[in-house]
Amino acid sequence: MIRINDHITLQDWELTESFVRSSGPGGQNVNKVSTAVELRFEAARSPAIPPDAKARLKKLAGWRWTSTGAIIITAEKHRTQARNRALAEEKLRELVLSALHRPKRRVKTKPTYGSQQRRMDSKTKRSKIKTLRSKRIDHD
């Protein structure tokens, strides 16, 4: 069971963890001990997460979101299963918390009169410079 905040707690049936061998260098120990954690969270079926947060979670998870609606998080930073398990749970907690945060809606604003004037003045100035550079052809 993982507690996300005061209102949301992920139940044990939503989570599955498996231990695999870590990748990369590490000597003989890395070939013998399965310390890396692969945490699978059934996000699409989770009743604890609101539907709008699920949509944001899917976008935030990216390639970690599977076709069945699960999120797979791996942790292999530490040399022990316990520390990697805690790291994977913390990664999941941070991901869900960021999905729960509703982004503020952008309020459209009108450019100020002064900014419009400055823009037009700079365009006029640039136009004059380009006109002076061009060769004038007389058609007389």
Image (cartoon, rainbow, N blue to C red):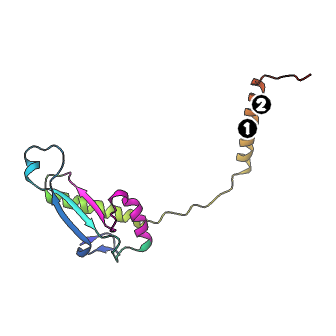
Image point (18%, 45%), residue name: 24
Image point (63%, 59%), residue name: 108
Q: For the C terminus, which image quadrant? A: top right
Q: Quadrant of residue 58?
A: bottom left
Provide the secondary structure element on which disc 1 rests: helix
Describe residue 65's horizontal placement relative to residue 127 as left or right.
Answer: left
Q: Which mark is residue 80?
A: none
Image point (73%, 38%), residue name: 123
Front-most of residues 93 and 25: 25
User: What residue is pinned by disc 2?
Assistant: 128
| Image spot of residue 75 (x, y percent) | 23, 56
User: What residue is pinned by disc 1?
Assistant: 123
Describe residue 18's horizontal placement relative to residue 9 as left or right.
Answer: left
Q: Is residue 66 magenta?
A: yes
| Image spot of residue 101 (x, y percent) | 43, 65
Q: Is residue 75 magenta?
A: yes
Sequence-earlier tag: 1 or 2: 1
User: Residue lying furthest bottom in this view?
Assistant: 47
Tell me which amino acid carries mark 1. Answer: Lys
Describe residue 90's horizontal placement relative to residue 82 as left or right.
Answer: right
Q: Which residues are magenta?
A: 52-77
| Image spot of residue 126 (x, y percent) | 72, 33
Tell me which amino acid carries mark 2. Answer: Lys
Q: How many marks?
A: 2
